[in-house]
Each structure stands twice: as C-alpha cells, then as structure tokens.
Amino acid sequence: MMAANTSTKSASSSSYKDVQGYIHAVSKLQIPANPKSSRYFDFTIQENHEETRVICFTPEIKDELKRREESKLPTSLKNISPQKRRYGEGVEYRMNKYSRIEQAKNLAFQWKALNTDESDTTVTQLLRSAPNGQSVALKAKVLFKGDTETVYSKHAKKNLTKCDLVVADTSGAISVTLWESQIAEVEPHCCCHFKELKLNCYNKKYLGSSTKTMIEKCENIDIPDAITSEAANLTPNQIKGLLEPVHSCDGICMIFFAS
C-alpha cells in the first residue's frame, strides 16, 4: 500500500505543505525517558536544492519510509508542517497522523547520496548551524575528562556509566558525554577522531555518544590559547544530572533530549 497513513486533513497552506524528494537516513524509533512524551523517529528528505530533517510522531509509517529509502523511490510527503529549528537556522518538517506518503511522479531531479558524518565538521559549525539530533564526526583534543558516574536507566532497568568531557578544535570547544565502554577509549590531552556522535541541546549544545559511536586516535591538534580559555568555562557540571539515556526500541542507547 503506497500511502502509509490514509487519514486526511483540511489544512491551511500557511500551516501545512507538500514536499517531494527522496528519503534518507531513517532513524530507529526513539523512546523518551519521560513516559508522557511521544515516541518518534526522524529522517532526511532530499528536495531539489536542499536536504531537510523531518521528525515523525507516527511510528507505524516508519517501515514504509525505510522501504522507500532502501529502494530510492521518489516520494511525496503530504500535509507536513514546517517548523523553525529550535536550535540553529532554517526549518525542519514535522509529520503527524494527518500526514500521508505517496509516490511522487516526474521529479526533475535524481536521487543522490547525502553527506554523512564521514565528512568532518568543526565545533564552530556545530554551534552555529547544525540541527539538534544530527549525527556528526569531529576531530578534537580532549582538554578535560571528568569522573565516571553511574546513572540508572528506567528503560534498560539497569545502571549505566557515563563520563563528561570537554573537547576542542582550532575553532572552539564543546562538551561531550560518553557512555559505557567508550569511556576507556579517551584520555585527557589525547587527540581523537569521533564518528557518529549526536548533537543535542539542554541549555547549551553538547555531543553525546551512542552504540554506533567510533573513536580513533588522530594527529595532534594545537589548540589556541583563546580556545583553551573558552573550554575552561565548559565544566561538566553544566549538564551534570540533567542527562537521561533515551532508548530505541531495540535497546540501542541514544543520548539526547526529545522535545
């Protein structure tokens, strides 16, 4: 069945729109720590001249979107709501029970591979324009490594260990939270190539690891004195006690706050 949700809604053009393109990077279903929050997943829609994040609060259409991603099918998303990004510039789309999926016809552009976190970013780029929830790669120096702490996860029903870092590159500094076995992979003052970190925000932007995160040692990075001074203000206490693991339905631990 082509339409994964057959509900219809009369929506004003100012609040809802239709977009066409190709589906990329359908995430796993995210289950917030707060039981009152809605389950959701996200993905990227490749439009003609841009790529836009889409947040979907209708878990039952996830499989259809995943099928379209794998088959590279031209897709029309009906009745979706453009929203200003909470963090960063630009817009993102939201899908709800009134949104529909249909086959797109006669698109004027072809499917293309999107940039992934194989392309490294900088701290400044993350802080200025990267959207919340984006998966990123970063080469940075560990300027501070805090103590390992234990956090009880309600969903996993067990204790998890976490550690807060402050890392920096030549453009700026940012906090990073590592979980479980990844903690032992970094030491103070080492330079690392972090892959598959998630950008999150609670008061300030920070990075969090998941089970997909990979950490490798990399070449030395000389951090300017001004950046080192900036990093001194990013103590882990700014986010201590505010983090709660968010679990996907298959038990993978994704660390970020759901809005």
Image (spheres, rainbow, N blue to C red):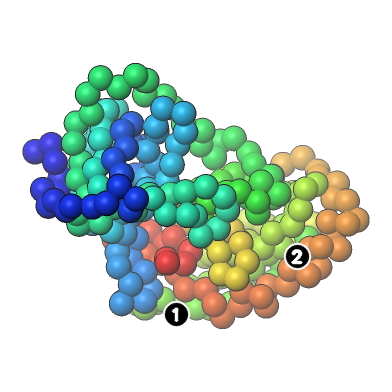
Find the residue positioned furthest to the right.
225
- Which residue is located at x 81 percent, y 43 percent? 220
Residue 5 in sight: yes
Label 2 neighbourhood size at 10 Å, few (<14), some (14-19), many (20+)? many
Q: Residue at x 65, y 51 (%)?
A: 128
Q: Which residue is mark 2?
A: 144
Quadrant of res 118: top right
> Left or right: 124 with respect to 181?
right
Q: Secondary structure at mark 2?
A: strand
- Residue under numbered circle 1: 152
Question: Considering depth in this image, is 246 or 99 the residue closer to the camera?
Answer: 99
Residue 185, quarter of the rendered image: bottom right
* SS label for mark 1: strand
Amino acid type shown at disc 1: Tyr
Label annotation for residue 252: none
Which of the two residues, 67 or 219, is positioned nearer the viewer here?
67
Query: Which picture quadrant has residue 41?
Result: bottom left
In the visual, does 100 lie left or right of 236? left
Marks counted in the figure total 2
Q: Which corner quadrant holds the C terminus?
A: bottom left
